[in-house]
Amino acid sequence: MNYSYNAYHKGTNHNIQQLIKEGVGINSISRLLNISKTTVLKKILIIASAVVKPPIPKGITIEIDELKTYTKSKTNERWVVAAYCRETKKVIDYKVGRRTTKTLQCIIDTLLFANPKKIYSDRLNIYPKLIPKHLHSTKRRETNHIERKFLDLRTHIKRLGRKSINGAQKDKYTYAILRIYFWGISPIENKQSKSLFY
């Protein structure tokens, strides 16, 4: 098979992006596009670097939660910490790392800069240390939207499945795939504007 030739077909990057947003795994993308897994991973990093993170709106209501995954081995835990905006119904920021004060502070500081109306979280004991009391709430069922988003992620992205054997080899690939999934060009948007990756 001539992997290098197929990898440089016009539209390959676009196809990779769309397959990721449809929940297709790395090995499957490699088979469908007839390019090596290594090339797919390299292109994912390139595509993700071109995806523009949307600005966080001011004065919004935010839900924040953590999703457990792993890197290389299931003993090497990682967490996707994501913030969901109720007004736009979209994920507005996320981090991948250990569930520590350092990881959570990176995302909380960004959210506070947007002057949110309220931030809802679970009862993890780190949040009260980072979120001002007048903004923070841990009421039951107030994180339903972000929890539903995480359920979608586990369904669409194989490496995030609870019983998956498709763990990421490096955190940067999980981060890149999520960036494409959350903020990459959708099929509808692509019809309205020329792809950046052709």
Image (cartoon, rainbow, N blue to C red):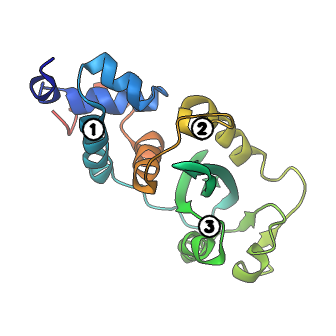
Q: Image point 59% across, 40% down: which residue?
A: 160
Residue 103 image offset from top left, x and y in percent: 58, 71
Q: Earlier in the sequence, mark 1 or mark 2?
A: 1
Image position of 74 with respect to 185: above or below: below
Which three-letter amino acid code belongs to the residue tagged 3? Gly
Inter-mark Cα distance, 3 to 1: 42 Å
The residue mark sitting in front, 2 or 3, is 2
> In the rendered image, which quarter is residue 140 located in?
bottom right
Query: Which comes sooner in the sequence, label 2 or label 3?
Result: 3
Left or right of 50? Residue 77 is right
Amino acid beneath label 1: Thr
Quarter of the image for residue 126 reads: bottom right
Crowd class of label 3 (few under 14; some 14 to 19; many from 20; radius 10 Å): few
Is residue 101 among what the camera can see? Answer: yes
Secondary structure state at the residue bearing disc 3: loop
Q: State which tag comes first along the sequence, 3 or 1.
A: 1
Q: In whole angstroms, how far apart are the C-alphas of marks 2 and 3? A: 26 Å
> Considering only vertical position in the picture, is 5 above or below 171?
above
Which residue does the numbered mark 2 point to in the structure image?
153
Mark 3 or mark 1: which is in front?
A: 1
Image quadrant where one finds the N terminus: top left
Q: Residue furthest left?
A: 5
Reading the image, the residue beneath label 1 is 38
Q: Position of residue 42 (x, y in %)?
A: 26, 44
Residue ID for mark 3: 59
Quarter of the C terminus within the rendering: top left
CA distance for labels 1 and 2? 23 Å
Q: Determine whether label 1 and label 2 are within 8 Å by CB.
A: no
> Seen in the image, is 2 located left or right of residue 33?
left
* Residue 87 in view (yes/no): no
Residue located at (57% from left, 49% from top): 73
